Every structure is written in C-alpha cells, then in structure tokens.
Image: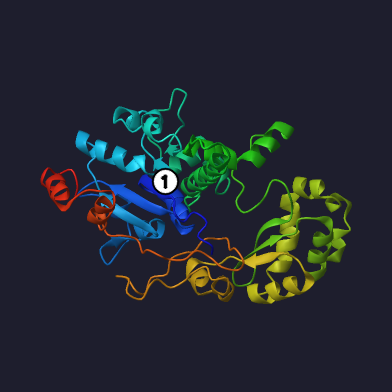
C-alpha cells in the first residue's frame, strides 16, 4: 500500500486501545510514530491478558509500525523533552484527561505557539466540555453511557457489552479521520488544528440508526438478540446442527427464502406482505421459518441459500475465522517478519486496500523503550545528554 503519510512525524502520548489504534493507523500509512511510554511500566495495555511469551496480546495488536521511547511525564524535564520533540512534529496525539496536557505545558496552545502547523489530536472519555469532562473512560463505559449495552444481548438477560472494543477502535478511527482532514486543510492554509473526539461521542454516533428509530416511533429500543429493528427476517435461525444468520432485507429476498425452505405459501400471507408487517409480526414469522430451518444442517442450508442468492452466514467462532479460506484469501492475517520475537504470530491487517495492496509491517510492536536512544540522537541529543537524562530517571 502506498505510504501516503511517509515523512510525517507523530508524537504519540496514548495508551490502552483507542489512541494506540489511531496512531497505528498513522504508522500503517507511513508516518514515523514515536510512542512515548512511562519508564518501568509503559502503556497500561502491556499488562493486559492474555500474555504471549511475556507480552500482552493486546499491546501487540495495536502497536505495530511505531518506535517506543520512555520519558517520565511526571518530571518537568520530561515534559520539556516531549515539548522539544513536538517542535519538529507534524502530529501530536494524546489520550490524557482534559486539562492534563495543559497542566504539563503540552496543551495545543502551548505546542502550537512554536509549531503553528501542528495537528493536535486528543481522545477523552466523555469529551472536553460538560459536567463529566474530567471523568476517565473505558470502552465498556462508553457502551453503557451511550445506550449500546441497553440494546445488546437478549430480552430478559443480564446486561451484555459488545465484546469487541467497538468504542475504543471507533474512537481511534474517528480521530484518524479527523487528523487526515486537518492535514488536507493544512496543505491549503499552512495552519494546524486541534482535533478531538471521545468514547462517548463515538458511542452516541454508533446509535445513529437506533436514535432515528426512537424519534420516529417513540419506542425505546431494548435488547434485540440477533435481530434488527429495521428488517425481518434478519436474525439467527437454528438448524439441525448449529446456527446461521439470515438477512432477507427486502421483499424479493423474503420470497426466495421461503422458496428455499419449502414454504412459499408463507410469503403469500397478507400479514407478511411488506417488511414493516414482517417486523411487526417477527415472532410469529420466526417460529414458522425456524420449523423449516431446523430440518437442514447448517452447511446444507447455507449451500441452498447461497445458490438462491439469499444473504446468509454460518455463525463462526474465531478459530474458524482464523483458518477461513476467504479471510486468508483477502490477506487479512499476514505473517510477521521472520526475525520477530514471536515469529508464529499473525497481525490483523487494515480492512482496506489500495490498488490491491494492504499495509506493510515495517516495524514490529516495539519492546518498552527500544528506541529511546535512537530517537533522541536523531533529535540532536548527544550521548552525554542521554546518559544524564537516564541518570536523572527522566528516560529509560
């Protein structure tokens, strides 16, 4: 994939998932990402489970194409050091609580004063204004506060979060998008910008369809299992040996589905004539159709549905996804560099290609402080300077 952002320097003060996913995207597209970590501990995600050969799988997943530098931001000299690095940077990204960077002299106004072309990105839990701005945020809190958990799972069951970090990764993606837009604007004006998002804003953004439906109907949506409030049949059905997800999203597909299941008369019933009627009568329709789907094995029914052009999928577990022919044909799970410290690992690549090519794994996820000396030397610090900073505990 073309390294569109090659030549751009990024100072990365993020940790956990949302910010590191954003900066990994910047690195995947060619930027030089300098990840600033705390001496001794590093990014909190380094302690996440599961551990693989002493390293966090989560850290490995979100920190390729970066260099790791250890600087103590609780020491004034450490903050000064980061500010000096930011003077020659194109992009500065942090995930600290609102006000934290300003207290350290690393706010947008502080850094833009000496680097007016700087693109400054921030991710917070609840946004930079409002009564909750100072609260910390994590993915499940964003899912809870934005209403996503209230609609997830099955009716009558305990609350269930979406297990994949949709809030964290979504926030990283939104910040990446905003940074790209700010870079385009900088090419026109020469001026940088401050780009901000939050876990709460991402969560509310993901509920766009649900909020529109609530306004239209006045009905507060609750847990919907595998169904969609917008269409039916659009849900999971039991087969003789497992489950499949069927998405008959229009009248034509509904008719085809009924034909495959040998119940064409169901499609002719007036109570199922339109999608709105099918949604209203979803439970009755589901029972009628599932009596038929249970007569097939999952693979048998999948073959018939695909042949008829009815959208459907088996409900895979991740071991099957990892080994799946289609997933691997798309190049989504490339092997890491053969000399990487975990040579059997595969990192999930970007879900986008340009001219058929995906991101290149130029740098494997770094060990803590792997590039401290290298980055500081490139920034004009002598070996004596580096030794003194290390003696004072400012760097590692």
Which residue is more in the foreground, 47 or 23?
A: 23
Q: Position of residue 391 (x, y in %)?
A: 10, 46
Which residue is more in the foreground, 302 or 285?
A: 302
Which residue is more in the foreground, 227 or 175?
A: 175
- For residue 111, which quarter of the picture? top left
The scheme the figure's colours follow is: rainbow
Under circle 1, the secondary element is helix
Task: Identify which residue is drawn at 44% across, 22% down.
Answer: 131
- Does 248 sit left or right of 135 as displayed? right
Q: Residue furthest top?
A: 131
Q: Residue tagged by mark 1? A: 19
The crowd level at tag 1 (other Cα within 10 Å; few <14, some 14-19, many 20+) is many
Above/below status of 342 relative to 149: below
Above/below status of 11 relative to 241: above
- Does 255 sit left or right of 141 as displayed? right
Above/below status of 102 relative to 24: above
Above/below status of 79 relative to 43: above
Task: Identify which residue is drawn at 31% across, 30% down.
Answer: 105
Q: Position of residue 168 (x, y in %)?
A: 46, 46
Marks counted in the figure total 1
- Does 254 sit left or right of 213 as displayed? right
Q: Position of residue 346 (x, y in %)?
A: 42, 69
Residue 158 appears anywhere in the view = no
Task: Identify which residue is drawn at 27% across, 59% down.
Answer: 367
Which residue is more in the foreground, 93 or 50?
A: 93
- Does 127 sit left or right of 259 as displayed? left
Q: Position of residue 44 (x, y in %)?
A: 30, 48
Task: Identify which residue is drawn at 40% across, 48% down.
Answer: 10
Image quadrant for the N terminus?
bottom right
- For residue 116, which quarter of the picture? top left
Residue 71 appears anywhere in the view = yes
């Amino acid at each position: 994939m073309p390294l569109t952002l090659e030549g751009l320097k990024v100072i990365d003060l993020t940790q956990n998932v949302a910010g590191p996913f954003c900066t990994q995207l910047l690195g995947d597209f060619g930027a030089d990402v300098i990840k600033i970590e705390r001496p001794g501990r590093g990014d909190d995600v380094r302690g996440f489970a599961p551990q693989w050969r002493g390293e966090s799988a989560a850290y490995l997943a979100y920190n390729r194409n970066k260099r790791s530098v250890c600087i103590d931001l609780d020491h004034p000299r450490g903050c000064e050091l980061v500010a000096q690095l930011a003077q020659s940077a194109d992009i500065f990204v942090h995930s600290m609580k609102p006000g934290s960077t300003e207290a350290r002299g690393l706010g947008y106004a502080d850094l833009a004063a000496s680097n007016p072309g700087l693109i400054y990105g921030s991710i917070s839990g609840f946004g930079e204004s409002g009564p909750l701005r100072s609260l910390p945020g994590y993915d499940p809190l964003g899912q809870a506060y934005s209403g996503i958990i209230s609609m997830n799972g099955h009716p009558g069951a305990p609350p269930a979060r979406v297990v994949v970090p949709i809030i964290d990764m979504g926030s990283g993606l939104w910040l990446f998008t905003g940074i790209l837009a700010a870079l385009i604007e900088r090419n026109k004006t020469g001026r940088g910008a401050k780009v901000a998002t939050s876990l709460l804003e991402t969560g509310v953004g993901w509920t766009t369809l649900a909020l529109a439906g609530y306004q239209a109907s006045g009905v507060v949506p609750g847990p919907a299992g595998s169904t969609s409030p917008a269409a039916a049949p659009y849900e999971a059905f039991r087969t003789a040996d497992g489950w499949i997800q069927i998405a008959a999203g229009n009248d034509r597909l509904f008719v085809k589905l009924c034909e495959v299941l040998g119940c064409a008369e169901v499609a002719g019933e007036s109570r199922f004539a339109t999608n709105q009627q099918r949604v209203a009568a979803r439970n009755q329709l589901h029972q009628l159709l599932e009596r038929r789907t249970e007569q097939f094995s999952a693979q048998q029914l999948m073959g018939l549905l695909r042949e008829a052009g009815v959208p459907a999928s088996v409900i895979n577990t991740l071991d099957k996804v990892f080994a799946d022919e289609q997933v691997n044909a798309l190049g989504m799970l490339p092997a890491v560099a053969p000399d990487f410290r975990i040579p059997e690992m595969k990192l999930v690549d970007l879900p986008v290609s340009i001219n058929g090519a995906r991101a290149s794994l130029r740098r494997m996820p770094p060990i803590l402080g792997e590039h401290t000396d290298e980055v500081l030397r490139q920034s004009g610090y002598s070996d004596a300077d580096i030794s003194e900073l290390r003696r004072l505990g400012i760097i590692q």
